[in-house]
Amino acid sequence: MPINNFITSSFENRTGFAIMTENYGKVYLVGSGPGDPELLTLKARRLIDNADVVIYDQLPGEAIIASIPKKAEKIDAGKYAGDHTLSQNSINKLMIEKAKEGKTVVRLKGGDPYVFGRGGEEAQELIRAGINFEVVPGITSAISAPAYAGIPVTHREYASMVTFITGHEDPTKNESGIDWEILAKFPGTIVIFMGVKMLENNVNELIKHGKDPSTPVALIERGTRPDQRVTIGTLENIVSLKNERKVKAPAITIIGNVVKLHDELGEQILEGI
């Protein structure tokens, strides 16, 4: 077998692009980015425009959802924390069902499908069902929302490392997979996805394990969208500020000294939008 054919065959088997014997359609797990329509990739735009079915979350934002062509079947999968229009199992079954009808399906997700987006789980289900699929990466809110708030997640003077964690773990797990003791000692930037509901617990864990209560914190609601809102505080007072300002999801939490740059850079960012 020629080497190119061998490589192609191996790649296809690993990623779910196996040769289909059925007349199935294809599923695209598409990351829509953080919400600003101009941050949607060219490939994502092309696939959305040509889809037969678009199964979307709320996280892509109203502007992107409104841009789905009328000819496509639009299915709202909901998916806010604790408030799901469809369960994950129902979404998996729906993707498979539509693909088996021979349709081109776009599973439209906020940010990047493989960064706390459950895209990996959906890909596994598609492989088990023998459905051809492709992953289309998107710009994650972990870097874009802070950038629009004038907060670079790394900076030579403030942070040479960054870590992403989820603030909403699988509720069926027996114990947390997050090591707060290590995170409390982590000298870089901590970015927490979906952490509004668990903010008080997360802050308490960090302080309990030795994180300086004066460490700067930013809560960024609806990052990169016209109604983006930023709340700046410290580990010591961010919970009271969240309650006072009625901060709601979708929001991302940034913890670390890079937050200090918001005052200097944030105004310049807003002027450029």
Image: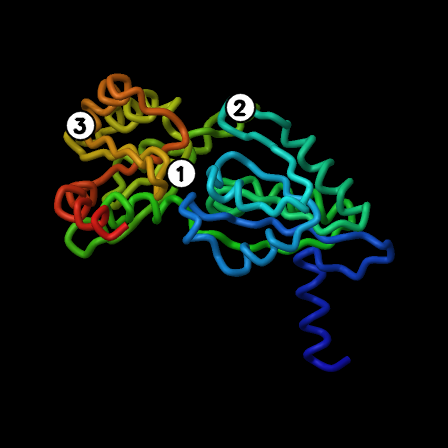
Q: Name the residue under label 1.
A: 165
Residue 170 image point, x, y percent:
53, 28
Give the alpha-carbon distance from disc 2 to disc 1, as whole Å.
15 Å
User: Which residue occupies 22% across, 29% down?
Assistant: 210
Q: In which quarter of the image is residue 17?
A: bottom right
How many circles with numbers are drawn on the protein? 3
Give the residue type at disc 3: Pro
Residue that numbered label 2 is attached to: 171
Asked whether the residues under the numbered discs 2 and 3 touch, taking CB atoms below 8 Å apart as contact, a structural biologist would say no
Looking at the rendered structure, the kind of residue marked 2 is Pro
At a point 58% along the width and 58% down the height, the residue shown is: 46
Query: In terms of sequence position, does the residue under pointer 1 or pointer 3 come before the other?
Result: 1
Q: Earlier in the sequence, mark 2 or mark 1?
A: 1
- Which quarter of the figure is the N terminus placed in? bottom right
Nearer-N-terminus badge (2/3): 2
Q: What residue type is labelled 1?
A: Ile
- Badge 2 vs badge 1, beta-carbon distance below 8 Å: no
What's the residue at 67%, 72% (across, down)?
A: 7
Residue projecting furthest to the front: 70
| Picture quadrant where residue 237 is located | top left
